[in-house]
Image (tube, rainbow, N blue to C red):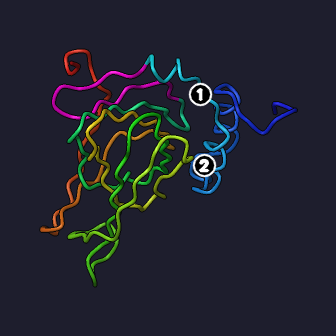
Amino acid sequence: MNGSSDHLSLEEFIFEMGSQPVEHLTHDRLMDLTGRLQLSADLIESRTCFGRDKYARNLICRTPAFELLVLCWKPGHESTIHDHVGSLNAISVHRGELTSRIFVPAEGIPAGSGPVVHDHTDTFLPGQGWTGVDRDGIHQLANTGEEDLVTVHVYAPALMTLNVYSPDSSKVELQPLRYTLAEDLD
């Protein structure tokens, strides 16, 4: 590995993430690796581009095992209530304040079905380390503050679709995702 420290460069992180099949990766292992990942502020800032109408998903790198993105949120931007269709997730706040709302299936409802109920809300600031949800976690992310929010996300494997939930419906909708394109940007 890197010998003298427990920090990981992006190159070392890519190697570690590819060292075992992604389906064997645990959330604890992902949190350990992301907690040691050292990304330069310049790299993050180079991918900091905000969308006009909703948060922006800006790619840093993608491998067969994972993808690393910078998400940019204007005040009021929020995600849907969703799970990651089996992908693990780790999130770090680079700038601003992240609101993370965690949901669970309503009483008596099996996992993967709706409706869902709000369980709790957490807020995260820069320097507080990494957070995220396991393969079956349901959450909603938001910028409820008055300043721009920039977050760094790792999805293992890459996140191509979401299951979208509602507190009011048993319907769960599979929605495709895409990276933000130039025409989406401010």
Task: Please tell me whether residue 140 is drawn above or below residue 179 in the rendered image.
Answer: below
Helix, strand or loop status at disc 1: loop
Q: Is residue 84 magenta?
A: no
Residue drawn at (54%, 34%) of the image: 64
Q: Nearer the viewer, residue 49 or 10?
A: 49
Q: Is residue 69 left or right of residue 18?
A: left
Helix, strand or loop status at disc 2: helix
**Quarter of the image holding residue 17?**
top right
Q: Nearer the viewer, residue 21 or 170?
A: 170
Nearer mark to the viewer, of 2 and 1: 1
User: Is the residue marked by circle 2 packed among few (<14), some (14-19), or many (20+) residues within 10 Å?
Assistant: many
**First along the sequence among labels 2 and 1:** 2
Q: Is residue 96 left or right of residue 105?
A: right
Q: Residue 56, how many percent across, how many down?
A: 29, 30
Type of the residue with mark 2? Leu
Task: Please tell me whether residue 65 is drawn above or below residue 119 in the rendered image.
Answer: above
Residue 39 tag number: 1
Q: Is residue 61 magenta?
A: yes
Q: Residue 121, how many percent across, how many down?
A: 35, 62
Pointer 2 residue: 30
Q: Residue 76, how many percent across, how many down?
A: 20, 42
| Residue at the right extreme, as displayed | 3
Q: Is residue 90 left or right of residue 33?
A: left
The span shown in magenta is: 47-62
Residue drawn at (49%, 34%) of the image: 67
Q: Nearer the viewer, residue 54 or 17?
A: 54
Residue 9 tag number: none
